[in-house]
């Protein structure tokens, strides 16, 4: 066996201490970032409906009066004085025309007609666009009683358009000037086609109401790249998965197995095949943290883990459900291109993973040359155990809290049953993996000569 020169003990000790401090600082940073990621602000919702037909577009929106407290509507006896509110409503109508940006083929449209009225919270005329348009043109009921800071201001705008088949986009800036990000729930209808609903973040850029296929594909590729680059748990699992791989060629089956597995559960979840129980997503998040801990522990206890591709496939099923949770709210922007958008999202995830590996593999190679293969493996795995354990504890607490809430509500057991079935499949596959290893059915991954230091 070829001998490899040993590094001085003092140098190794200083390097190990430096690596330990860096890993500890990064663990605290990731923990803080993960904690802040779960803090969601409370916001008001703006509801709207839009239709393009022939040479005109109609937009009807209901804005909660909580977002229009500076409109200066007259009040008497704790109620709005609707008979005297005409000038204030006209001013609010003009200001809101700038808050809703409707564009055709990239050109902002200018309304040629508008109406507005105050409505009570129990008004039912906003169920369909035809009903809302008819109600907006109806005479104002001056005798209606609406308490101050309750109800809605309902506005209608009519825009001239060049063609019904144009590309339409919308942006909502309602209450952005007062520091409130009010999301917009909008249902868009093109002619006699069935409408599509989506939720748009307040202050966001222009959003396609009915995107073309190539725009939907590009958008979801970008979304997949952004998700994998910001998904610290998926990246940490990927690190623990490949840190024991010695050759670049051995990464291909591992990444391929992970891709195929998470694609199956991702597409299945997007098509509605996953359990709908609210307990299922937090259980999946906890399982993702557990997959990091398990993989990292295997790296430490085994110097040459075998069949890493099968491990990637098993846990890839779990990570696919995690990807679907992030994708669920974005599928509304796919328009008529659901399957294409799913495939594009997968392409984006794989492109992001390959980018991370292209950057991370040279770093691992240099660290292995500087320290040793085993030192880098143990250090990275220890980092995975620490951070994964913190995530597991935090996410399991979320599961317990939600389970307590569900016990007092009419929650079903789909989430728990689906999760148990998934874990059962993983357990059976793991058992089959252990049995096959005992009988030597997998390729021999014995360490190459010269990779370990001779004691």
Image: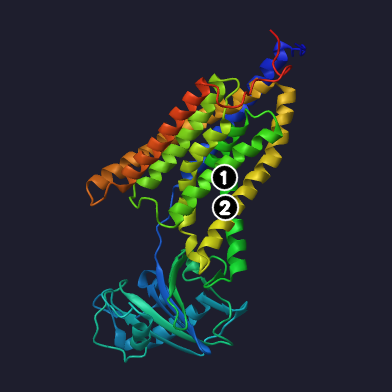
Q: Element under label 1?
A: helix
Q: Residue at x 64, y 49 (%)?
A: 351
The foreground one among 16 and 418 is 418
- Determine if residue 370 is in view: yes
Give the left or right position of residue 365, taking residue 80 as reference: right
Q: Residue at x 65, y 39 (%)?
A: 252
Instruction: Give the residue pinned by disc 1.
Output: 259
Q: Element under label 2?
A: helix
The foreground one among 38 and 162 is 162
Q: Are marks 2 and 1 in contact (CB under 8 Å)?
A: yes
Q: Is residue 112 above or below residue 293?
A: below
Instruction: Give the residue pinned by disc 2.
Output: 346
Seen as rendered, the residue at the extreme top is: 455
Q: Residue at x 61, y 67 (%)?
A: 215
Q: Residue at x 49, y 28 (%)?
A: 433
Give the left or right position of residue 443, taking residue 4 as reference: left
* Relative image position of residue 286 (x, y in whole percent): 42, 38
- Determine if residue 202 is in view: no
* Relative image position of residue 393 (x, y in whole percent): 41, 33
Q: Quadrant of the N terminus?
A: top right
The foreground one among 4 and 199 is 4
What number of labels is visible? 2
The foreground one among 241 and 249 is 249
Q: Is residue 110 above or below residue 309?
A: below
* Relative image position of residue 220 (x, y in whole percent): 57, 59
């Amino acid at each position: 066996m070829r001998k490899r020169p040993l590094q001085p003990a003092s140098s190794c000790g200083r390097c190990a201490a430096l690596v330990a401090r860096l890993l500890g600082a990064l663990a605290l940073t990731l923990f803080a970032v993960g904690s802040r990621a779960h803090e969601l602000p409370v916001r008001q919702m703006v509801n709207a409906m839009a239709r393009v037909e022939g040479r005109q577009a109609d937009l009807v929106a209901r804005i909660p009066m909580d977002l229009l407290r500076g409109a200066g509507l007259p009040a008497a006896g704790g109620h709005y004085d609707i008979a005297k509110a005409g000038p204030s409503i006209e001013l609010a109508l003009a200001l809101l025309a700038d808050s809703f940006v409707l564009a055709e083929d990239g050109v902002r449209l200018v309304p040629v007609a508008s109406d507005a009225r105050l409505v009570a919270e129990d008004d039912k005329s906003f169920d369909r666009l035809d009903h809302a348009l008819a109600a907006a043109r109806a005479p104002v009921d001056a005798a209606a009683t609406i308490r101050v800071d309750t109800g809605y201001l309902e506005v209608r705008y009519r825009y001239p358009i060049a063609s019904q088949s144009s590309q339409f986009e919308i942006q909502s800036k309602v209450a952005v000037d007062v520091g409130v990000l009010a999301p917009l729930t909008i249902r868009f209808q093109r002619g006699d086609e069935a409408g599509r609903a989506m939720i748009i973040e307040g202050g966001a850029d222009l959003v396609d109401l009915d995107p073309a296929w190539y725009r939907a594909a590009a958008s979801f590729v970008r979304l997949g790249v952004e998700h994998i680059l910001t998904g610290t748990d998926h990246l940490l699992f990927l690190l623990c998965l490949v840190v024991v791989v010695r050759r670049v060629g051995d990464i291909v089956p591992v990444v391929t197995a992970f891709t195929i597995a998470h694609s199956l559960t991702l597409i299945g979840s997007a098509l509605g095949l996953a359990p709908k129980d609210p307990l299922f997503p937090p259980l999946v998040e906890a399982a993702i943290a557990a997959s990091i801990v398990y993989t990292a522990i295997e790296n430490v206890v085994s110097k040459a883990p075998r069949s890493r591709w099968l491990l990637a496939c098993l846990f890839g099923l779990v990570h696919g459900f995690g990807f679907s949770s992030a994708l669920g709210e974005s599928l509304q922007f796919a328009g008529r291109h659901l399957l294409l958008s799913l495939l594009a999202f997968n392409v984006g995830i794989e492109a992001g993973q390959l980018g991370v590996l292209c950057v991370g593999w040279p770093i691992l190679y240099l660290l292995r040359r500087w320290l040793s293969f085993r030192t880098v493996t143990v250090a990275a795995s220890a980092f995975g155990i620490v951070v994964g354990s913190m995530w597991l504890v935090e996410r399991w607490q979320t599961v317990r809290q939600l389970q307590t809430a569900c016990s007092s509500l009419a929650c079903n057991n789909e989430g728990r049953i689906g999760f148990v079935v998934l874990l059962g499949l993983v357990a059976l596959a793991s058992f089959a993996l252990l049995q096959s290893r005992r009988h030597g059915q997998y390729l021999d991954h014995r360490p190459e000569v010269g990779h370990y230091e001779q004691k």
